[in-house]
Image (spheres, grey):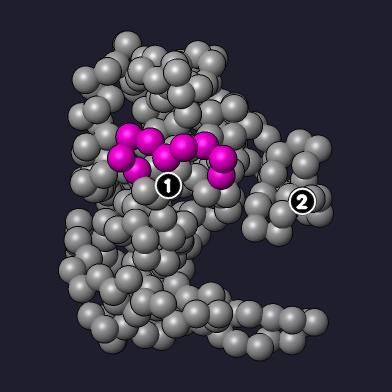
Amino acid sequence: MKVKNIPIIFENNNFLVINKPAGISVHGDGKTDEYTIADWVLENYPEIKDVGEPFNIEAGGLKLKAIPRPGIVHRLDKDTSGILIIAKNQETFLKLKDLFMNREMKKTYEAFTYGWPKEDKGAVNESIARSRGDIRRYATGKGKRGEERDAFTEYETILKIGKSNKEKGSVERGDYAFMRLFPKTGRTHQLRIHLKHLNNPIVADPIYAPKREKALGFERLALHAREINFILDGEKYHFLAPYPEDFEKAIGLANADKTC
């Protein structure tokens, strides 16, 4: 998937904020030659090719390959859309990296989930580790193995979408919910795992809800990095990523069939 026109939300001399489309990886994995956000950065901002830190592929303690990550401070899953910050110089990269590491970035995601959560507002405080049964997955509780990492997510329900398909096996407590998520840590697959922990996995999640029907028009993970707030060099920044087309359509469907 080669995307020539990546929407730029904000840009100054030190960093830019883009609205990443779903379906494109942030950087390569050393296994495929698919086009990535890192490739787009190198094409459009070649002067920042040495900014940041590469992703090192290792085996047996030996570094096999270094994957370029020009200016990339954090990442989103391939099928997640939304806000991504890219540093334009090393000084800014290190400052932004520290903000993420020190949990001073206030992030908001939005997602459509299967079913309604038992509580309209709440939090999940469940550590995450590799899954015992599937190397692609991470897990909470008894299904995890190896090193555990703390993970904390707050959530609130924006819309409940009522029973519309009882004959097709709608899940208990309702069909779908539109939820706002506030991750306080930044673990791999954190939001996906925590919503599954609530028994409300994200719509069209191929890893954590592989047997569920795709719904609301989504052909990809229904997760969008909507908003971010932070302070850099004494200045406050707030960015909002417009919804992609599939989210706009799903929100329209949700409003037409909402119960609250």
- Asked if residue 214 is among those painted magenta in the image, a careful observer would answer yes
Return the residue nearer the eye: 92 or 122: 122
Q: Is residue 154 left or right of residue 157?
A: right
Residue 49 horizontal/vertical position (percent): 36, 85
Per the image, the residue denoted by label 1 is 221
Image: magenta residue range = 210-218
Which quadrant of the figure has residue 144? Answer: top right
Predominant SS along the magenta part:
loop
Kind of residue at disc 2: Gly
The answer to which image quadrant residue 229 occupies is: top left
Disc with the residue nearer the chain's start (1 vs 2): 2
- Describe residue 27's horizontal placement relative to residue 227 as left or right: right
Q: Residues within 10 Å of mark 2 (few under 14, many from 20)?
A: few
User: What is the x, y in percent for residue 146?
Assistant: 81, 54
**Is 190 placed above or below 101 here?**
above
Mark 1 residue crowding within 10 angstroms, few (<14) / some (14–19) / many (20+): many
The residue at the point 20 percent across, 61 percent down is 8
* Identity of the residue furthest to the top in this view: 259
- For label 2, the residue is 133
Is 205 placed left or right of 42 in the picture? right
Q: Does any portion of residue 245 appear in the rendered image?
A: yes
Q: Does the magenta segment cover residue 55?
A: no
Residue at 40 percent across and 24 percent down: it is: 177
Tell me which residue sits at (45%, 43%) in the image. 204
Q: Position of residue 1 (x, y in %)?
A: 32, 71
